[in-house]
Image (cartoon, helix red, strand yellow):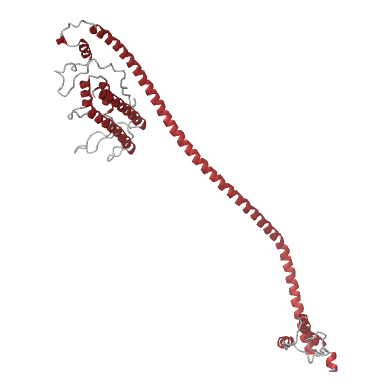
Amino acid sequence: MGRHGDNRSKNPGVPAVEASSGANAAGHDIVNSVALHIDSAVIIFPEAYPHLTDLPKQAQRADDRAATQVLYGQELTHLEAEAKQLRVRLLLARDELTACRPVTQALTAAREEAAGFATRLTAVEAELSEARTRAEAAEADRDRLADQAAGQRHQLKHAVAYSREQQSALAVQRERVKTLQVELQVFQHQVQPLLHQPSDADPQQGNPAEIVLASLTAPGEVAGAHAPADALAVVQASVPVPDWQPAPVRRWRPERELAYPEPWNMDEPLSAPQRERLDMLRKSWREFTKDLKTTRSRLGVPFHVRAARRTINWLHRSTGDSRWLLLGESIEALQHFDIGYGPTGEATPDAAVPKPPEYELTMATVIAYRCSVDQLRTDLRKLTGLHFDRHR
């Protein structure tokens, strides 16, 4: 108890080892094995492990035997070599670290600059997206305004043309009114003496006023004996002189026609726009024929009188109203609307392909034609109403 108690380690949990000689010194492996397999009840603190591993070295240094000193020297030489290598590697590592420090700094600066570029790129992309959105909106507004301007220019062009045509028609009407006023004065001067003649005139000769009125009408419209079988009596002189005249037909075709564009399809000689516009003309003319059918029914036109011009001629002969002749002239100017605008020639064994139209049908021509037809329909309805009220 006394000797072992004196050589016991001050650190609890570490067994005492005699370091006076190397005879009983435990090897490094044995110390480790003892540390691993020591009783679990004994607590070994971490700071005791270097002391345990250093015990074999102390024992070797204290051992006087030559073999032990040789082993100790070899181990010391080996450790010094390892330490020298470690110092060399440490110096090399320091040199490499010193050499890599600028690169590391440059890399760090590059990363920071790249981060700044990424932030600026994100901001530029956002601005570019907003600018693109504004540009698209501006383009849409520009297209819309361009369409509106084109439509307004088109309407203004047609309005100017229509205004000029109306002014020309108004000038013609004024000249016609002046002519009718002169004719009315002449007619009054001719009828006035006849109305004041004595009443002992030959009754077989008829009323002189009727004779004068009959003399002013067209040839073949005076005597009922020479009139067609389907004609009614000529209007009497008691019918008031008309104070309204139908508007003359306007020139709806342009003075200079546009040639039909080429090339054209032999199977479809009419282009789609030309076909649609020609259908508009046909539709306008069908609307007029419907009004003319109503006129035939109201004024008692015979069934066998079918054509538009024949109907107008019958109404002129039956009523003696020269205003029907004006409507007949308008009909002549408007009923042959497809001349030059439709394909010419028929498919025959010798010529199986019809020729293309001569002229291009523009929308301005369609509008002018429809205005003329509308005016003709208005005059037809008004004149029909006047005669229907008189003969009702």
Which residue is most to the bottom? 1
Residue 59 seen = yes
Q: Residue at x 20, y 22 (%)?
A: 318
Q: Describe residue 338's horizontal placement relative to residue 99 as left or right.
A: left
Q: Nearer the viewer, residue 168 or 81?
A: 168
The image position of residue 336, as x and y in percent, is 26, 29
Quadrant of image for the C terminus: top left
Q: Residue at x 22, y 23 (%)?
A: 315
Residue 357 seen = no
Residue 61 position by quadrant: bottom right
Q: Nearer the viewer, residue 172 or 277?
A: 172
The image position of residue 377, as x and y in percent, is 30, 28
The image position of residue 173, as x and y in percent, is 34, 18
Q: Describe residue 326's horizontal placement relative to residue 304 as left or right.
A: right
Whether 119 is drawn above or below 37: the answer is above
Quadrant of image for the N terminus: bottom right
Q: Residue at x 75, y 77 (%)?
A: 81
Q: Residue at x 33, y 39 (%)?
A: 272
